[in-house]
Image (cartoon, helix red, strand yellow):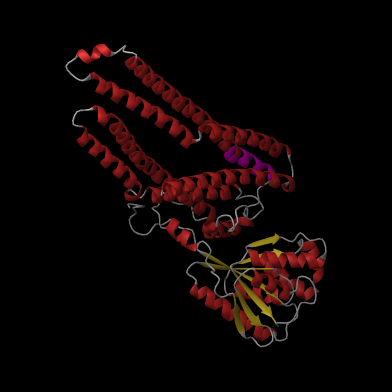
Amino acid sequence: MPSHPHRGRPAVCLPAVLAIGFTGHRHLENEKQCREALREFLRGKKRAHEGIVFGVSSAAAGGDQLFAESCLELEIPLRVLLPKPVEQFRGDFDAAGWQRTEKILEKAISVEVVAEGRERREQYYDCGIQTVTESQLLIALWNGEPSRGMGGTQEIVAFAEKTGHPVAWIHSGTGELRAINSHAAQGGGRSELEFLNGLSDYGATPTDTTPRALAEAWLRKMDESANHFAPEARRLASIPVVYTAAAAVLSGVAPEIPYAAPWLAVSAVLGVVAIGLPSALRLHARQALWARTRTAAEVCRSVLALWRSPMVYNLLGPEVAPELAGMLRSLNYLKMQEARREAPPLAEFKKEYREQRVADQMGYFTRQAARAERQERRYRAVSWMCGAMATLIAGAYLAGEAGWIGLHIFPAHQWIALAMSGLFEIATMAGAFAVMKDSTRRRRRYRELSEALARWDTQIEALNTWGTVLPVVTKVERALLVELLEWRSQLELAAHHGK
């Protein structure tokens, strides 16, 4: 199957990233040995990974500091997750310890408060669990003993082990390295990212060298790929329908035509060809290709819509779309690189989001609703008109109203039979297409979404803090993602039934 022609290696590619999380003790028996063990492990991972390796950890005293400092010394980007706001977090340190952590926070590419628990132990537990979920591999600097309280290293390791998360356990006393869940994949969507990166650039090039420019160029590449595959899939999908209709018409008319056997043979051939065409043309693979690129484009568009907001994009997790996990990690990493440089005023973000995201989607759904309504009317009109004409001809013929045609030099009843069969077939096909296109439901759904977006747009305009605006923005993006995933599932279901 011709797929994605390009010359040489595409230039617009997202980096494959490996997020390494960390959990460890505050008090270490041999800090020097632990530091060397961490450095050696991180060096090996950085050497072995073709893309970008970055660290994910808190910045508490002890093991967190060793891991964070090791990452920074090895020029491995660091994302810091805090159990509480910096002002409160500072109270957990003495002067010397806070000075070390302050340097870590200054050099990290991202610093986020992630815990939701009210009590101190809950905050640290939440932060540890979040570190596991935000990483592909967890390093545990642990002596193997039970935790002294909630949020201890043993609890975090136990959670990772039970959920099948890969863990590299470095014994904090002996320095021995042991693997837990080593069979679990660390890639998580990497093969899909490699496939998407391998598509033709279609002329998309970054406008500058910033991470956002790369993400925008990648979106253009996905858009153009989807636009390339969509008409190809639709055009080829119509061929078996035409063959099936022709076979049905001939099989209905052939008995009324002299020398019917050859026509029945042609009808049979057309029917057999129609059955085999989807496989021969690889229609399901082409539709899947279209769905994959369109889904990637729309998810990337959603990430870019929230690019300048103070949040990491987590609306679509690997449990919902595991094949896109690699792409989302890469886009989030690019966003984190600019997080500290881009801090727009809320009013500026609201204006940009409402004009470029909400208004654009409202216009899209309004146009789609009108289009679905036109489709519905058109298919219904064709079905009724052809059905009515075929019925009138059949009634007139049976009543003897058309008997005079038999006086002509050709057997008229044969052509009348052909006309009736053809009209009934067209009416049936129009009705079938109306059901396949699901025009009525889509029209209703598009209008519901457009109305919901209008309500949320009013709320965003009226709200004046990040804490109130972001939940509404999240509602918008999740509604759009649900619509996208529903479309994709319907396409996959149709392809499955067509096999």
The main secondary structure of the magenta stretch is: helix
Q: Residue 419: x and y, percent?
A: 30, 23
| 326 relative to 344, above or below | below
Q: Residue 451: x and y, percent?
A: 64, 33
Q: For the point 79% across and 62% down, which residue is it? A: 87
**Is residue 353 highlighted in magenta?**
yes
Magenta residues span: 346-357
Task: Give the camera-side residue of 289 and 209.
Answer: 289
Q: Quadrant of residue 135?
A: bottom right
Q: How many marks can you see?
A: 0
Q: For the point 25% across and 27% down, which residue is it? A: 256
Q: Residue 25: x and y, percent?
A: 73, 78
Task: Give the camera-side residue of 429 and 398.
Answer: 398
Q: Quadrant of residue 129?
A: bottom right
| 345 relative to 199, above or below | above
Task: Give the camera-side residue of 204 and 168.
Answer: 168
Task: Give the camera-side residue of 200 and 316.
Answer: 316
Going by the image, does 182 lie left or right of 88? left
- Spot the residue most to the front: 399
Q: For the point 61% across and 48% down, which residue is it? A: 306
**Is residue 29 highlighted in magenta?**
no
Query: Is residue 327 among the parts visible in the rendering?
Result: no
